[in-house]
Amino acid sequence: MGNVFQPTVIAEYLASLAPASPHTRAAYGRDLALFAQYYATLAPAIEVDGQVLRGFIAHLHRHGRAARSISRTLSAVRGLYEFLIGQRRAQSNPVAGIRPPKAPRRLPQLLDVDQANRLLDVTPETALECRDLAMWELTYSCGLRVSELVGLDLGSLDLTAREARVFGKGRKERLVPVGRQAVTALTHWLSYRVLLVASEEPALFVNQHGTRLGVRLVQTRLKTWALRQGLATNLHPHMLRHSFASHLLESSGDLRAVQELLGHSDIRSTQIYTHLDFQHLAKVYDHAHPRARHKK
């Protein structure tokens, strides 16, 4: 068959991706155009096979492409061939046997214990500050995702039993304990909440108009709160979840318990916090061991 990387063929494939987001289609378009440009430098009519694709990967490496970006480009080429196979315009997919490069594992950013205390050791002065403190305490106490936080209803919370019922990814339900400081902050917030909402509003956390908070507003409020507390880090809610997991694992050493509390279906997702714990130990070692310290 002819060159499958002609602009008209690529355009047909991208049009078939209509259910995908515009950002995905645009990225795939750039990736396929990049491969088409590389393919044009090869001998005429050469077949795209594993050798060609490995040469392309090496080419991207030389030009500074990150592993994640290369993997996405291979996904775009794979998807194009799957599209053509479905139309019987290609017989096989040359990407099928190609392994994408492994991306380096990025360790999550988090607060240390002193920073977490500085964030939370605040006496709120307004109703909205009471709400905000309750959100930060609850997120850090339970390791919540921001989507889980804003999705909580009044009925999700049992302050007497000190527990919360949370719906995570895929509406997977879990029951998590709530710490004493979070219970105190939530009790204060609930005394203000009744003044803001109509009786039929189920949301635990509401805005000044009495309706459920959105994710974006929570993110903005936390950044502002952190700056006011002198934390230079660009703080976002997921950092509180990471901090919860790392601090709990450091104190308990119980990886399975942390997995359950975070709602991870695969323990490999939780194991990243063991790397963080080791990083902390390595820093202590480098600072303290006489054979590790640099001479002044």
Image (cartoon, rainbow, N blue to C red):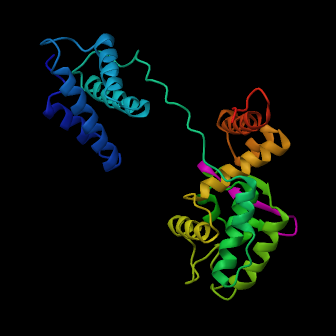
Total labels: the figure holds: 0
Name the residue furthest right. Answer: 160
Residue span colored magenta? 158-170
User: Image quarter for residue 73?
Assistant: top left
Measuring from the top left, give residue 134's x and y in whole percent.
71, 71
Relative depth, front residue between 179 and 96: 179
Name the residue furthest front. Answer: 296
Q: Residue at x 69, y 72 (%)?
A: 133
Q: Quadrant of the N terminus?
A: top left
User: Is residue 146 in sight in this rendering?
Assistant: yes
Q: Residue at x 66, y 49 (%)?
A: 242
Tell me if residue 144 comes above or below residue 201 in the rendering. Answer: above
Relative depth, front residue between 124 and 261: 124
User: Is residue 204 in sight in this rendering?
Assistant: no
Q: Please say whether residue 165 is one of the residues in the magenta stretch.
A: yes
Name the residue furthest bottom. Answer: 195
Relative depth, front residue between 82 and 243: 243
Residue 184 lies left or right of residue 152; in this view the side is right
Q: Please say whether residue 117 is one of the residues in the magenta stretch.
A: no
Relative depth, front residue between 137 and 229: 229
Q: Quadrant of the C terminus?
A: top right
Tell me if residue 150 comes above or below residue 35 in the rendering. Answer: below
Tell me if residue 225 comes above or below residue 69 in the rendering. Answer: below
